[in-house]
Amino acid sequence: MVTETQAETSSPGSARERLLAAAEALVYAGGIHATGVDAIVKQSGTARKSFYTHFESKDALVAAALERRDERWMNWFITGTHKRGDTARARLLGMFDVLREWFVSADFHGCAFLNAAGEIASPEDPIRVVAREHKERLLAFVQSQCDDYAAESGMDARRAAGLARQWLILLDGAIGVALVSGNADAALDAQAAAQSVLDAACVGEAHHALNKSSRKRPPPRRTVQSD
């Protein structure tokens, strides 16, 4: 037998889903500490009792809302990236075009996960854990694209791992600059820097391959001339 609470939880318009949607929207726009339970309950259109039925605290609700956002944001970013080209290089650079589309939207308030992590001191807090897991998931996707790029260009796998970490910094840097400056073209500036990183990586890989090839060559044979 399905209880009323279970039915609410599983239905698209359930009290739990409305609380999650309200918490995500309010926290993203105004921050965790500035958003009270009463405001979340009011925006969700649920009773305060529903909040305590589904969540033990506001922090638990915020963590769950961030997990919900992580799933949706990653699906959006991955889908948008794959639409940017058939090659790994095109997809890697296209990530910044995807970000720029987000930056020009009316509801852009930066990275929800960096914002949340900045408000929470303890690295073991569930909210910080969700934020960290989001960045790990984003890095894993970027790494997959860098691995594809390495296969296309002949880059060493260790260099691809380093490239992925650099790429994540460029992505987060673009988000931060766009938030503070209000300039969506921060994505294009980061894209230009990213292109330079790729070009430098290709040159470095070519030099590495040349040096490696030179070391494998046998020394020239010396001929002895007779008098």
Image (cartoon, grey):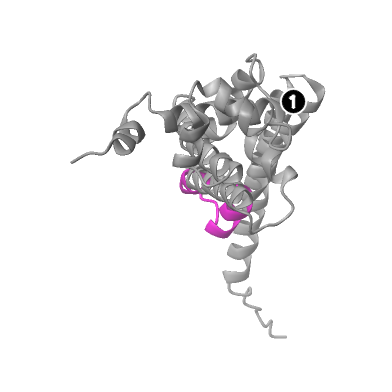
Query: Within the magenta stretch, is there residue 169?
Result: no
Q: Which quarter of the figure is the C terminus placed in?
A: bottom right
Residue 32 location, quadrant? top right
Where residue 216 appears, as percent x and y from the top left, is: 57, 70
Q: Is most of the magenta stretch helix, strand or loop? A: helix
User: Can you name the residue that lies furthest to the bottom here?
Assistant: 227
Residue most extreme to the left? 1
Number of other residues with Cα within 10 Å of mark 1, as a class: few under 14, some 14 to 19, many 20 or more: many
Q: Which residues are magenta?
A: 146-164
Can you tell which quarter of the image residue 112 is in?
Answer: top right
Q: Nearer the viewer, residue 58 or 91?
A: 58
How many numbered marks have been drawn onto this rendered protein structure?
1
Q: Quadrant of the N terminus?
A: top left
Residue 74 visible, this orientation: no
Mark 1 secondary-structure assignment: helix
148 vs 206, nearest the viewer: 148
Q: Would you place residue 65 above or below residue 80 in this image?
A: below
Q: Could you say which is closer to the camera, residue 171 or residue 213? A: 171
**Mark 1: which amino acid?**
Ala
Q: Position of residue 11 (x, y in %)?
A: 32, 28
Whole-percent x and y of residue 35? Answer: 68, 31
Return the x and y of residue 106 as percentages of the image width and height: 65, 14
Residue at 57 percent of width and 52 percent of height: 160
Horizontally, is 102 left or right of 88 in the view? right
According to the image, label 1 marks what residue?
178
Q: Taking the image as drawn, is residue 212 in sight? A: yes
Question: Magenta stretch: residue 162 in it?
Answer: yes
| Residue closest to the eye, 196 or 119 | 119
- Is residue 129 toward the left or the right of residue 179 in the image? left
Q: For residue 41, which quarter of the picture?
A: top right
Residue at x 67% of width, y 25% of height:
29
